[in-house]
Image (cartoon, rainbow, N blue to C red):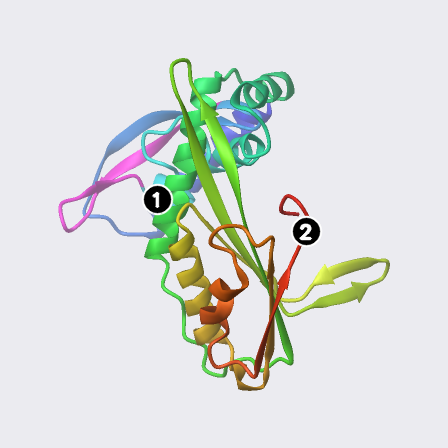
Amino acid sequence: MIATALGQALEDLDDLLIGETEYQEIVGKRERTLNFMCGAVTFKRRLVKLTDKKYVFPLDRYLQLIPRSRFSPLMVEKVAKLASHSVLRTTALAVNLLTPLSISHQKVGQLYQTAGTQCEKQREETTLVTVAKKRQVPYLYLEGDAFCVAIKAKHHHKNIFVHRLQLTEGITQNGQRRQTLNRHVFTGLNRRVVFKQAQDYLSQNYDLQHTTVITGSDNGSGYEPSCFDELAIGAKKHDGAQLYCGPWH
């Protein structure tokens, strides 16, 4: 029932998108089946011809669906996150037991690589908006780490390193819960690209001349204290710390 209702809702959204936008030509409707968390969902959406002679599906573009993929973006994200903390066969078993879907460990590996590719593509296409007035804060906290994911197949295996940087302005108390202030996370498969993203974000959003930047990592390769110096350029002070907190959390 949920899958049927979701399919109808997607078709209604397609009607709304077509009604609000003028296209040169509507070619017709095409059917697509996607695996969502609730199961397989089948729906029809319109194929249109733009003024530049290109053919697009407005619904697919609006929802940012991955071309030719049989899985929804959220499903790809959840499988990739689970695979980053487990082996592929265990991830496939969890998906098969906890959802209406059936997936192989080979497909889990493909989805994990798809998620990484989409992440890199989105990072490259995203243009940071220049802030009119940069933030001035007394402290900024920047943590860095990387973890290895082993993608195993029948005749070969491949290790993929995921790099992360987490930037916060500190911690605030909200009742009995502690929350990070203005948390921003940079993630990718290329360490240099991730560091460059963080550097661009800092330069465009913060005035560091009165800020103490505190950085920390496990001192692994590429995450030595000196590697964070470029992220603290222009800061009042840079304090580097070596953390022994184990896996990223």
Q: Mark 2 points at which residue?
A: 244
**For numbered disc 1, what is the local secondary structure?**
helix
The outermost residue toward the bottom is: 210
Residue 207 in the image: x percent, y percent?
51, 82
Q: How crowded is mark 1: few (under 14 residues within 10 Å), some or many (20 or more)?
A: few
Task: Determine whether 69 is above or below 54 in the image.
Answer: above
| Magenta run includes residue 52 | yes
Name which of mark 2 and mark 1 comes first in the sequence.
1
Q: Residues within 10 Å of mark 2 (few under 14, many from 20)?
A: few
**Which image quarter holds the N terminus?**
top right
Q: Is residue 169 left or right of residue 199?
A: right
Query: Can residue 15 be seen in the rendering of this structure?
Result: no
Task: Determine whether 192 is above or below 231 in the image.
Answer: above
The quadrant holding residue 123 is bottom left
The quadrant holding residue 99 is top right
Q: Residue at (78%, 60%) from the top-left corner? A: 178
Residue 12 in the image: x percent, y percent?
45, 38
Task: Determine whether 190 is above or below 199 in the image.
Answer: above
Residue 90 in the image: x percent, y percent?
59, 20
Say which amino acid is labelled 1: Arg
Q: Name the residue under label 1.
A: 61
Image: magenta residue range: 41-57
Query: Could you say which disc has been placed on residue 91 in the image?
Result: none
Say which amino acid is labelled 2: Tyr
Mark in the foreground, 2 or 1? 2
> Nearest the camera: 129 or 82?
82
Between the residue at mark 2 and the residue at mark 1, the CA separation in whole angstroms equals 43 Å
Q: Is the magenta stretch mostly helix, strand or loop?
A: strand
> Nearest the camera: 180 or 1?
180
| Magenta run includes residue 61 | no
Query: Can residue 220 be seen in the rendering of this structure?
Result: yes
